[in-house]
């Protein structure tokens, strides 16, 4: 099992099981001892990360994000700050550039809550990160 640095804020579940769910997760700088499969084993079909600044996460969170993406689950990167957008600027492990290279979707200037709603709508038709990114780029 891997260790990762995030805490689940909330998972949005629809009243009917036919609608996909998306978990909203806050990034922290301290690794937590939880199995990395917690959010998506509970039925979440996508994950929104509340990253730091322009969309950067800690190294343990980056490793967990790569695991989630490898399982075919779309991961959307948003920011915890009140305004601004996420950009693939920094190239360190966990920086926006490496998250983008790993296959994460960037939420542009949407808040994490709005990004979760758009991800849930996108999951109605696709789970392809490239198509989901096109929706976030509009």
Image (tube, rainbow, N blue to C red):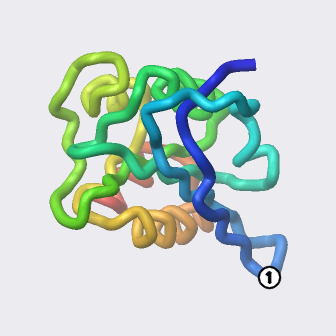
Q: Which residue is mark 1?
A: 15
Q: Nearer the viewer, residue 69 or 89?
A: 89
Say few, some or many: other residues with alpha carbon within 10 Å of mark 1 (under 14 / 14 to 19 / 20 or more). Answer: few
Q: Residue 92's x, y, as percent?
A: 27, 17
Please give left or right for residue 131 compared with residue 91 in the image: right
Q: Residue 78's x, y, as percent?
A: 35, 53
Instruction: Check the image and report above or below for 40 versus 70.
Output: below
Instruction: Find residue 72 and report its image quarter.
Output: top right
Please give left or right for residue 21 compared with residue 113 in the image: right
Name the quarter where the C terminus is drawn: bottom left
User: Which residue is painted at 55% across and 41% down in the image?
Assistant: 6
User: Which residue is painted at 71% across and 54% down in the image?
Assistant: 44
Q: SS at mark 1?
A: loop
Q: What residue occupies the far bottom of the structure in this picture?
A: 15
Instruction: Check the image and report above or below for 22 versus 61.
Output: below
User: Which residue is painted at 62% across and 60% down in the image?
Assistant: 22
Instruction: Check the image and report above or below for 132 versus 114.
Output: above
Q: Can residue 118 be seen in this snapshot?
A: yes
Q: Residue 20's x, y, as percent?
A: 69, 65
Instruction: Check the image and report above or below for 33 versus 77.
Output: above
Please give left or right for residue 95 compared with residue 11 in the image: left
């Amino acid at each position: 099992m891997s260790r990762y640095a995030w805490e689940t804020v909330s998972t949005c579940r629809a009243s009917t099981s036919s609608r996909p769910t998306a978990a909203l997760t806050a990034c922290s700088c301290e690794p937590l001892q939880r199995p990395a499969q917690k959010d998506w084993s509970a039925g979440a079909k996508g994950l929104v990360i509340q990253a730091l600044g322009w969309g950067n996460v800690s190294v343990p969170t980056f490793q967990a994000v790569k695991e989630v993406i490898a399982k075919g689950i779309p991961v959307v990167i948003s920011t915890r700050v009140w305004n601004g957008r996420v950009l693939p600027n920094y190239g360190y492990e966990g920086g926006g550039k490496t998250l983008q290279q790993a296959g994460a979707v960037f939420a542009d200037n949407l808040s994490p809550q709005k990004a979760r709603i758009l991800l849930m709508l996108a999951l109605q038709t696709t789970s392809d990160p490239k198509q989901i990114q096109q929706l976030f780029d509009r």
